[in-house]
């Protein structure tokens, strides 16, 4: 993360754990940051399936954005709050890295998280992992965004009330 950015980190080991957990290389494939974050489960709908019989690119975006929206709402950042404060999050750049095929009626787990934020919360980054039922990574979505003032239509830092709520998004449950 750049200067002035906060970065989400896993919590320190509990005092009752005298030794750190050792993860064998063979188990790394199933270990995700998401094991420490919120999870949202979905059944892949037919309307998101492409001509090759798997989840279309826009389907990954749909499920990823919906998971991030749910995470925000779970922390009190509701559409009503954004409307009242006349400000809301926008995305400038999003990339997807595809790893494994997802098919119709598959159950997927979406793990969104805010990964960094400027000191004034004006700019932020997120990562959303989409994994299958066997906890294999299917895709990762990376986004950079900011807050847009609804009146001026320009990027602006959110009010303190919203900053406090968004700072909670950096914490891992």
Image (cartoon, grey):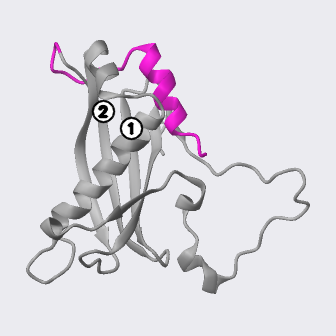
Q: Is 66 or 172 nearer to us in this picture?
A: 66
Position in image of residue 116 (x %, y %): 47, 42
Q: Is residue 8 above or below residue 165?
A: below
Q: Is residue 115 left or right of residue 123?
A: right
Q: Report which residue position mark 2 lands on.
A: 146
Q: Is residue 63 above or below residue 44?
A: above
Q: Residue at x 29, y 77 (%)?
A: 102
2 and 1 marks in contact (CB < 8 Å): yes
Q: Residue at x 58, y 61 (%)?
A: 35
Q: Which mark is residue 124?
A: 1
Q: Residue furthest left?
A: 51
Position in image of residue 166 (x %, y %): 46, 30
Q: Quadrant of the C terminus?
A: top right
Q: Earlier in the sequence, mark 2 or mark 1?
A: 1
Position in image of residue 23 (x %, y %): 70, 76
Asked which secondary structure carries label 1, the reply is strand
Q: Is residue 108 left or right of residue 102?
A: right
Position in image of residue 103 (x %, y %): 26, 79
Q: Is residue 138 left or right of residue 9?
A: left
Mark 2 crowdedness (10 Å alpha carbons): few <14, some 14-19, many ≥20: many
Magenta span covers which residues?
A: 151-173
Question: How many numbered marks appear?
Answer: 2
- Spatial separation of the CA atoms under disc 2 and disc 1: 6 Å
């Amino acid at each position: 993360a750049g200067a002035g950015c906060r970065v989400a980190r896993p919590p320190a080991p509990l005092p009752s754990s005298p030794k750190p957990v050792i993860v064998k290389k063979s188990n790394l494939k199933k270990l995700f940051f998401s094991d420490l974050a919120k999870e949202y489960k979905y059944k892949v709908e037919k309307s998101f399936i492409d001509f090759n019989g798997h989840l279309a690119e826009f389907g990954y975006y749909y499920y990823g954005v919906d998971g991030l929206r749910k995470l925000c709402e779970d922390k009190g950042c509701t559409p009503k709050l954004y409307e009242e404060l006349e400000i809301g999050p926008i995305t400038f750049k999003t990339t997807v890295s595809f790893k494994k095929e997802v098919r119709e009626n598959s159950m997927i787990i979406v793990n969104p998280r805010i990964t960094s934020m400027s000191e004034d919360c004006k700019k932020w980054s997120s990562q959303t992992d989409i994994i299958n039922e066997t906890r294999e990574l299917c895709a990762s979505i990376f986004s950079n965004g900011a807050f847009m003032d609804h009146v001026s239509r320009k990027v602006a830092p959110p009010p303190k009330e919203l900053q406090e709520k968004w700072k909670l998004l950096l914490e891992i449950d």
